[in-house]
Image: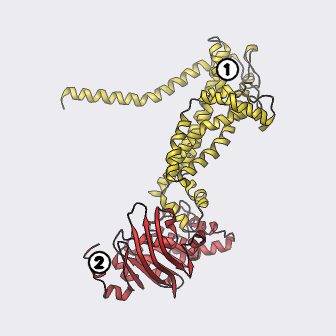
Chain colours: A red, B yellow
Amino acid sequence: MNKISIQNFSLQYSDGTESLRNISLDIPANQITVIFGPAGGGKSSLLRVFNRLNDLADVIQQEGKVYLDKEDILSPKTDVIALRRKVGMVFARPVVLPFSIRENLTYGLEVAGEKNSDRIKHSVEKSLKQAALWEEVKDRLDDPAIALSGGQQQRLCLARVLALEPEVILLDEPTSGLDPISTGKVEESLQDLKQDYTIILVPHSVQQAARTADLAAFLLQGDLVEVASGDTMFTNPQDKRTQDYIQGRFG
Amino acid sequence: MDKSNIRHEFLITFFIKSAGYSAIVFVGMIFIFLLLEGLPAVQKVNLASLFSSRWYPIENYFGILPLIGGTIIITLGAIFIAVPFGIGTAVYLSEIAPRWVRELMKPFIEILGGLPSVVLGFLGMLILSPFLRNLLELPTGLTALAGSILLGGIAIPTVVSVAEDALDAVPKSYRDASLAIGATEWQTIWRVTLPAARSGVLTAIMLGVGRAIGETMTVMMVTGNAPILPKGISDLFSPVRTMTATIAAEMGEVASGSVHYHVLFLIGIVLFLISLVVNITASAVVFRQKKRQERILS
């Protein structure tokens, strides 16, 4: 079943730097879809379409349709706030808000209007467990979040998204600043999470793409070159450019 | 290095050093001067009558409470105006306004900050106080309220530019993160951006307060200058007199060395201490937060 469907989507920034050209892609539910390719290819831009974070950027032109469960999310009538609760995002560099660990998690719930303190408490614990962080922080939830290590911060960001119980999780190079052990932990939790969520990941390396992808999409300078299942893509790519990139001839 | 070079270096270093230390020396000298001229007042007028509520120097009544009260009520009024407007403007400029509006507004705010206060006093006398008199049906428009409004206006540019810098320094990623978990723009500003810029915003407020306390010319022109001790909110609508205005108005006519003369200097000391306290509080708040951050980051 497709969770998200992108049809003939194009995007251009006002300074003309990065753009997307005529992208069509179906993203299946409960799988990890990996969007990979060299820097400046439009991966982050595409990711930011799904939660309309591009609304804040200088986008001059946007065409095509993007559906989430049959709902046109680019329509001006879409409730962007509700959309962002359904489509959570983890950024490349961990961005913990300048609060305590607990407040980082409750903030999203509170702005969503959740007032039941039992449910909030339960959700804090559950999301930290899902992000494989609970054991490390359970005794110091009121410490400032900035005191955590980089890897812990990134898992906190993941927990913050999970606390909202979204349907889709967007991950923009979530492990680019992390050591191999933390990276392993994050990837492991992703494998568990895909039971409940649709995951779209921009990996920080081809290796990570190959490790995690159920479905892989290769994006090169705004063009979607090839889409295939993870197994096919990294063993037997069809397009010459994909081959070259995977084998490390450029990028 | 030859000999003349060494002497050269020494001279330049010496010059720069003394320029640096001169600030401390000047403050110290000013304070000593104030003490020397002001403390005799305590000997000549006893403390009880100094802190009484009657200021009538010709008949030897030197109660400075009405003047302190005047300064406080006007400053508080100014804070109530300058803080919401100043912070609001700063938030609008840094978070909401499109770029071209910001580029247009910032110079205007700087011009507002550079307006001579006597010009504002002029506007206050001719436009604001008659307007207030008619609007509120007061016997006179020259009231604490008029002074507060103008002082608020004077403090706003200071508050805006410092607070705007602080808000600008908050990383964009905080805003993205907050928006991405479904916070509205206003929730993001109120719960993430403003708290993150807290120390800068507090500094902005303190600098604005400092500006308001020290202002002389405007308040002298619009507050009516009646040394009556304000006792509550309702006294916003009656004339008051501030410490600064008293010194400015009376210093020129006082006999040097007289009791009155020494009391005016004593008022100067009180004013000096108040701004010292404001400044120390501001830097203590900022310093504590800095240390906290350093501790966390290390």
What quarter of the picture does the C terminus of chain B occupy?
Answer: bottom left
Identified at 47% across, 53% down, the residue is: B294
Q: Are marks 2 and 1 in contact (CB under 8 Å)?
A: no
Give the number of callouts: 2
Q: Can see residue A22?
A: yes
Q: Residues within 10 Å of mark 1 (few under 14, many from 20)?
A: some
Does residue B286 appear left or right of residue A41 in this picture? right
Residue nearest the viewer, comparing A227 with A208: A227
Q: Quadrant of residue B192?
A: bottom right
Image coordinates for residue B280, horizontal then vertical, percent = 56, 38
Image coordinates for residue A105, horizontal then vertical, percent = 57, 68
Residue nearest the viewer, comparing A44 with A101: A44
Identified by mark 2, the residue type is Tyr
Does residue A78 appear left or right of residue A221 in this picture? right
**Circle 2 — which element?**
helix
Given the image, what chain letter belongs to the residue carrying mark 2? A
> Mark 2, mark 1: which one is toward the viewer?
2
Alpha carbon separation for disc pair 2 and 1 = 86 Å
Identified at 77% across, 32% down, the residue is: B133
Q: Residues within 10 Å of mark 2 (few under 14, many from 20)?
A: some
Label of residue B126 in the image:
none
Identified at 67% across, 73% down, the residue is: A118
Image coordinates for residue B77, horizontal then vertical, percent = 69, 38
**Circle 1 — which element?**
helix
Residue nearest the viewer, comparing A7 with B59: A7
Vertical relation: B296 (above or below) A9: above
Determine which residue is flagged by label 2: A245
Does residue B70 appear left or right of residue B114 in this picture? right
Does residue A46 appear left or right of residue B234 in this picture? left
Determine which residue is flagged by label 1: B42
